[in-house]
Image: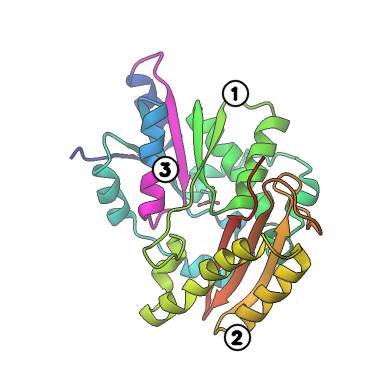
Amino acid sequence: MVDSKVFTSVDSLRDEILSRGTGQKVGFVPTMGALHHGHMSLVRKAYEYAEIVVVSIFVNPTQFNNSKDLEKYPRTLKADIDLLSNEGDVIVFAPSIEEMYPPNYKEIELNLGDLATVMEGKFRNGHFNGVVNVVNRLFEIVQPNFAFFGLKDFQQLSIIQFMTKELKLPLEIIGCEIIREESGLASSSRNARLSEKEKDEAVILSTALRVAKELATVFPPIKVKEIIFGIIRRSSLELEYFEIVDPITLLSISEWAPGSQACIAAYCGEVRLIDNMQLTSAK
Ligand code: PAF
């Protein structure tokens, strides 16, 4: 076990990365902390691609549209650093808000089109504008060759891929599989806010997605949606959306296509959870 080095300023982080030698590939895992198995799998994946791995821990206020959600977001820096220390010589970047957004900071302007207005975008106004800006700022600071994002945030991953292409950023985005608890519940920092009872109840999200995948072989998308709405309505969760979408445009589909994707968001008590699953094979 190597103690992870923690840097809070951009300059000290840059110095550390440069001190590791030239010609080394940099893998980057951006996070908001409260690290779990899912994040650790991203770190391991990063080591498959790069010699230097940087993990940022920054709860980005500009991507929260609900101040209570921001306030309640779990912050566990010490435990996060301990977890990362098990994974190798990880460089941790844990900046303050002032370091990330200095007075001369300027937002990028990027038209995300429908990618940012459907699903999460519909229910979390301004969320993706906050995400693309913080991720772009982190990319500028870390200058990675590869950046790793979990597929659990399917829409976020699509948007980051779009941003990277549009801005012609010199790095590769790697989407990594969803890590699930034994129960099927997708690993998420927000799970830390669920009671044991709620954790059991939240399993209905992944169950519903699995049912949708089975039904996809028999029924059209509209019928599958109707059945899934019924399943969630009968549970203790409050559904925000369940959509079956094209994996590229993220627009709702009425006929099955390669890689059709189901995405769901619901409240379990006070905690908002999301999950998704590919329902039809990609080709
Ligand atoms: O997925 C997250 O944890 C965040 O949206 C990210 C990518 C770290 C940006 O703040």
Which of the pair 72/272 is nearer the observer? 272
Q: Residue at x 64, y 83 (%)?
A: 233
Q: Nearer the viewer, residue 87 or 45?
A: 45
Q: Which circle's residue, 3 or 1, is located before the other in the chain?
A: 3
**Residue matched to label 1:** 170
Q: In this rendering, would 254 be left or right of 4?
A: right
State whether residue 62 is above or below residue 223: above
Percent across and percent down for residue 141 are 51, 32
Residue 120 percent location from the top left of the image: 67, 60
State the residue at coordinates (69%, 31%): 165
Which span of residues is magenta-colored?
21-42
Distance from the alpha carbon under mark 3 to that under mark 1: 20 Å
Tag 1: residue type?
Pro
- Find disc 2 in the rendering and name its residue: 234
Q: Residue furthest top?
A: 23
Identify the residue position indicated by label 3 in the image.
Answer: 42
Foreground mark, 2 or 3, reads 2
